[in-house]
Amino acid sequence: MMRDLTDDVALMRPVIDALRASGTDPDRVLGRVGLAPGGLPAGRFPHAAQTQFWKAAAEECGEEHVGLHLAGHLPAFHGLLLEYLFLSSETFGAGLQHSLRYVRLLSDTLSARLEVNGEEAVLSLGMQLGSSRHFPEMLAGAVIRLFGALTDQEFRPRLVQLMHTEGAPPERYRAVYGCPAELGADRYALSFDAAVLAKPSRHAAPELLRIHESLARRQLAEVERLDLVRQVRELIAELLVNGGATLEQVASRLDMPPRRLRERLAMAGVRFNDLITDYRCRLAKELLLKTDERIEVIVERTGFSEPSTFYRAFKRWVGETPVEFRRRGKAEASRTVDSDCSL
């Protein structure tokens, strides 16, 4: 099963700062992607939304290579938990290893790993091809800038590898990254001098490191909790089309025993039956208001075996019958349209 990839909004907050520092009003960009002025909401958002965001940013900045452009305006530190793991670790290398365990806190598209071969170290970011090229180009610049600040500018990048084949002129990459960039590579990666991994941290604090790791573990558990609930919701939607969505069916698709799925959902604070009910209710409302499907068809699509069972359930959920709900909803929509069209 393909799951929807998400990013944490914390990953985009430095970009908002960079937009502002570059002379572009970030509220104009946010408004064009349907977000209210003043900043990003809390939580995670679909990674697919990156494409729309970067298109709006490019047009507002008037900059074809907007990710690279904004990388030059990023603040060195962004106030991220992963940065505190770096700072409180004994060395830069130890901080990097600690941070790699929790990189999913930033994005589902990152599967970072560190390889050391003699004098060269390679940080592979493992992002999937298909993302807007501006996102990885910005991220590479952010990583180089952060690593430089963490090592008192002893960090020396050698090469940035980018999977996309079309990009900026070579001199633009060298100016922003301080090293060449290779387009059309088989991965997103950053190579650098391995000697910097031994650089001691001036802020090393074992007690703080334990606190930061504990917080990172809790945050990662929350991401995984939300991920499980999202996967179960998606499978319920898929299975109901074929007339069923039992706990056993969903557990089988997730390749885990039903008892384990029930326990994990309980730990996430939800029950399987509640997820089924919520999906059925939402789908029934949408079909009643946005389509002219017959009630019999809606009964089938929401996974009920009998219209009478559907009627009783819907009355319990909403407080009125499906027919009453549809009639009232469409009457209200009609009045709204009439009001909008009046002179």
Image (cartoon, grey):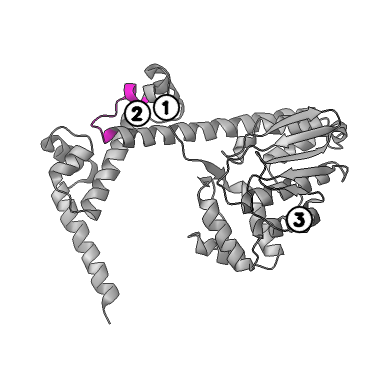
Residue 249 lies in magenta, yes or no?
A: yes
The magenta stretch is 240-250
Badge 1 crowding class, 10 Å Cα cut-off, few under 14, some 14 to 19, many 20 or more, is some
| Camera-nearest label, 3 or 1 | 3
**Percent from the top left, x then y, of residue 110?**
61, 38
Label pair 1/2, CB-CB below 8 angstroms? yes
The disc, 3 or 1, on the residue closer to the chain's N-terminal end is: 3
Question: In the rendered structure, which amino acid carries the disc numbered 3?
Answer: Pro
Structural distance between the alpha carbons of marks 3 and 1: 50 Å
**Percent from the top left, x then y, of residue 208?**
75, 32
Comparing 248 with 260, the one in front is 248
Disc number placed over residue 272 in the picture, else none? 2
Residue 132, compared with residue 212, is above or below; it is below
User: Do we see residue 212 in this rendering?
Assistant: no
**Residue at which label 1 appears:** 265
Structural distance between the alpha carbons of marks 2 and 3: 53 Å
x 33%, y 21%: residue:
248
